Amino acid sequence: MAELIDKARIFVKAGDGGDGLATFRREKYVPRGGPDGGDGGRGGHVYLEVDPRLNTLLPFQYERRFEAERGQNGGRQRKTGRRGKDLVIRVPPGTVVRTVIDGQTYEVDLVRPGQRLLAARGGKGGLGNVHFATSTHQAPRIAELGQPGEERELELELKLVADVGLVGFPNAGKSTLLAAISAARPKIGAYPFTTLVPNLGVVEVGDQTFVVADIPGLIEGAHAGVGLGHEFLRHVERTRLLIHVIDAAGTEGRDPLDDFHQINQELRLYRPELAERRQVIALNKIDLPEGRANAERLRHALPVPPSDIFAISAATGEGVRPMLERVAELLRELPNPLAAQPPSEEVLTWPLPEVDPNAFTITRERGGFRVRGQKIEKLVSMLNFAQPESLDRLQRNLEASGIADALRAAGVQNGDTVYIGKAELVWSEDEEA
């Protein structure tokens, strides 16, 4: 069986916008034609889309960089460049996607088939010179560059989607039980994970199969992240049913009834609905005299329907088959939350806070001044500084937006460097200004 990787880190880049064109109409009988440079096309977006046929993040261990297509440059005769092709990256249902934007971590959960996340936006196409003509300036020699596409480093995490989770204290017999119920079956394999090593077993009961996950044991304080607590608990979040394995013999010196309550308390503290999930109790180790003697007492003391409590021996196989038949019966009744999800055409975006595009800040940086602001940074990223008119446009915008006055108030002097986005500009103005 192939490896199942539950975490991956990839880099995505949306396509840059195409450049606008600065050209003029040239025809035989129109010697002084006006501007006719077209706009650039938008760069391709990068989407992540849920594909229910996938169940692993393994491909992302080999391919980690993804780039969407650049927009086409504008053409003559006001022709707009072609849009860059969007890039769609397919992920399994249950994939959690995280990224850091402006120092803040954002998270989106992708579950429903067809659901999409707009992970990185393509850059806007630059405007051609037809947009800069005015009654007083009829021959503009300025056009915008395409806006750079967004870049994101994404962390992908696939929550293990097993039908049944084995929970219980270390040494309660979970691994032995998994080996017993999946012994000599070719569909069984161990799946190495990046942070811990659970084992998955495909169990067959008649013509029904289901996946059982044996995950390293839980310890007190797991809900608070003690040990591998969070790594364990996040893997049982989407199981439909839990087999709670209890050491009925108390071989570790603990009381089996206390073990039951403590495991459920850890589940409850981490996520209350986990403790409410349907449980089948496996009173294990009845091959030992203490286990067989305790089984009847525990059967009456546990707050679980008698039909869901089984005295078993994972070591000898006693009582295991009836328990598996009950598990299969319950799974037929319990809905599969992922398979039952209806297809979705929903397009999700990062839950970013609302920002005033005209707002800006000025801070000291590297002996100069750093200007930050959505609108001004976008403008600068699209200016073609090889065109003298672009500098005039920038200066007008700095004055109109109040940024120039704010820089003066902050103490900017001729010769100081002003950083905006990736641009480094030298401040210069007349002494009278």
Image (cartoon, rainbow, N blue to C red):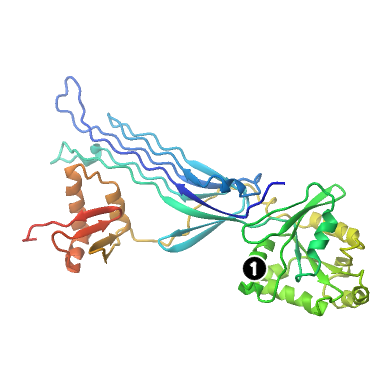
Q: Is residue 60 left or right of residue 396?
A: right
- Measured as percent of width and height from the top left, residue 19 is found at 31, 39
Q: Residue at x 30, y 62 (%)?
A: 359
Q: Is residue 164 left or right of residue 397?
A: right
Residue 367, placed above or below residue 71: below
Residue 307, placed above or below residue 141: below
Q: Residue at x 31, y 34 (%)?
A: 74
| Quadrant position of residue 244 | bottom right
Q: Is residue 182 left or right of residue 238?
A: right
Residue 389, placed above or below residue 312: above
- Measured as percent of width and height from the top left, residue 199 is found at 73, 57
- Measured as percent of width and height from the top left, residue 122 is found at 41, 45
Q: Residue at x 93, y 73 (%)?
A: 292
| Quadrant position of residue 414 | bottom left
Q: Is residue 99 left or right of residue 221?
A: left
Could you tell me which secondary element the residue under label 1 belongs to?
Answer: loop
Q: Mark 1 Cα within 10 Å, few/some/many (few <14, many 20+)?
A: some
- Whether residue 329 is visible to the viewer of this picture, yes or no, is no
Write down the residue under mark 1: 228
Residue toward you, 327 or 427: 427
- Measured as percent of width and height from the top left, residue 433 is found at 9, 60
Give the total number of marks visible in the rendering: 1
Residue toward you, 88 or 428: 428
Residue at the outermost top position: 28
Residue toward you, 285 or 345: 285
Q: Amino acid at mark 1?
A: Leu
Q: Residue at x 76, y 71 (%)?
A: 169
- Whether residue 33 is visible to the viewer of this picture, yes or no, is yes
Residue toward you, 306 or 291: 291
